[in-house]
Amino acid sequence: MQQSDRRQFLKLAGLAGVTFTAGLFPKGPADAQAGDFHFVQISDTHWGYKGPANPDAEHTLEKAIVTVNGLSPKPDFIVFTGDLTHTTEDGAMRRARMKRFKEIVSELNVKDVRFMPGEHDASLDKGEAFKEFFGNTHWTFDHKGVHFIALDNVSDPAARLGDEQLAWLAADLKQRKPDDRIVVFTHRPLFDLVPNWDWTTADGAKAIDLLMPHQNVVVFYGHIHQEHHHMTGHIAHHAAKSLIFPQAAPGNAPKRPPPLPFDASLKPLGTREVTISKAITITELPVTKA
Amino acid sequence: MKRRVFTALLIGSAVGGAARLLAAETGAEVSVAASKFEFTPDTVKAKAGVPLTFVLTSFDRIHGFKMPEFGIRTDIIPDQETRVTITPTKPGTFVFFCDVFCGDGHEEMAGTLVVEA
């Protein structure tokens, strides 16, 4: 689908949000690669959160699922980029939240759904419960000529990828050609977005160094609960909105402020659709139709 | 005299100072206790040009202590003293925070260093 056609469709469907188009694959796809498609990124649902930052917390995820289920054509797959559940020190409660979360998202009418952890899911037990419910915390797959890599920068509570995972990443990248199209998913930003708010990955620079020789790389992440776009060299990094509460703009105070006040319109929250063709188009989707 | 356990000994400098590997014997010390989800005290004062050693303890779990503007971080291990020395070079206000995820409230676990002339 052409970008303009897609935007037109979204308007007709009443779903159009902010559309962001970037030359995310700056060198263009290799000739052998083909196939336009789109996927949906959902992040930071924090199932189990109760508090004033979102009095609608028990229903926001369900509303977003209805919206995503209304997309036509359907996305090829959906990826959750972490903080599926809100943290708890009670391991039984953590598993109960993951179980309920999994039941809710089973209502998605796209069956290729992929999960990665955030620190709320995995940092207190090094990913143990997450693995029981969702499988590995880092993984790869290929889809229509694009190589996808999910990195785990949360199972270590100090936000490190770790030498073992970095070696795994290096080995995977060795199998890629320099102009292969590569999409990376992480929960936390790989780069130093706001070090004083801990919006970074302790050894994220090592991952970026490994990715840098590859010409067509883009990173999608969550954690900061807002749309954000940043470049490290030719690599674009795109943060997604949350489905629980928005956070303050990066670096607007010396200390990280608490979540922003609840907006009953739910407009600061949402998901996003990513269309991949020669360029990548990001369309921010609202929780509910206008 | 109680034996101190030096699990981390780093000296940072706020703006342009060189890191050193050994703590200065002179200078100020301040004890800071880490617990879910706060530092006590959460405001510390220092003088520019005078080394300041944080004597860090925790009684509940591992926490972190990070000051990006000074280029330092360390784990705070329960029932140990962890000493970190910095030498601020100019007045200002700087943040320290826990960078080891410790639960619901971790994001608010931060303090302030106020450096006076």
Image (cartoon, coloured by chain):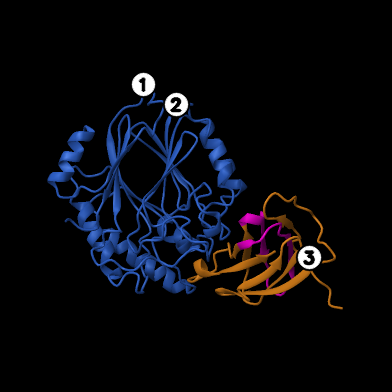
Which mark is in front, 1 or 3? 3
- Between disc 2 and disc 1, whose residue precedes? 1
- From the image, tell me which residue sits under label 2: A179
Residue sitting at x 36%, y 74%: A50
- From the image, tell me which residue sits under label 1: A31
**Chain B is shown in which shade?**
orange
When the figure is inspected, residue A66 is found, relative to residue A238, above or below; the finding is below
Residue B6's tag is 3
**Residue B80 in the figure: left or right of residue A29:** right
Question: 10 Å neighbourhood of mark 3: few (<14), some, or many (≥20)?
Answer: few
Query: Dividing the picture into quarters, in which one does residue A225 lie?
Result: bottom left
In the image, A5 versus A96, the foreground residue is A5
Q: Are marks 1 and 3 in contact (CB under 8 Å)?
A: no
Separation of residues labelled 1 and 3 (CA atoms): 58 Å
Separation of residues labelled 2 and 1 (CA atoms): 10 Å
Query: Dividing the picture into quarters, in which one does residue A100 lie?
Result: bottom left
When the figure is inspected, residue A37 is found, relative to residue B53, above or below; the finding is above
- For the view shown, which residue lies furthest in the front direction? B117
Q: Is residue B80 visible?
A: no
The blue chain is A
In the image, A219 versus A33, the foreground residue is A219
Question: 10 Å neighbourhood of mark 2: few (<14), some, or many (≥20)?
Answer: some
Chain that bears disc 1: A
- Identify the magenta region: B68-93
Chain that bears disc 3: B
Chain that bears disc 2: A
Q: Is residue A100 visible?
A: yes
Q: Position of residue B5 (x, y in %)?
A: 79, 69
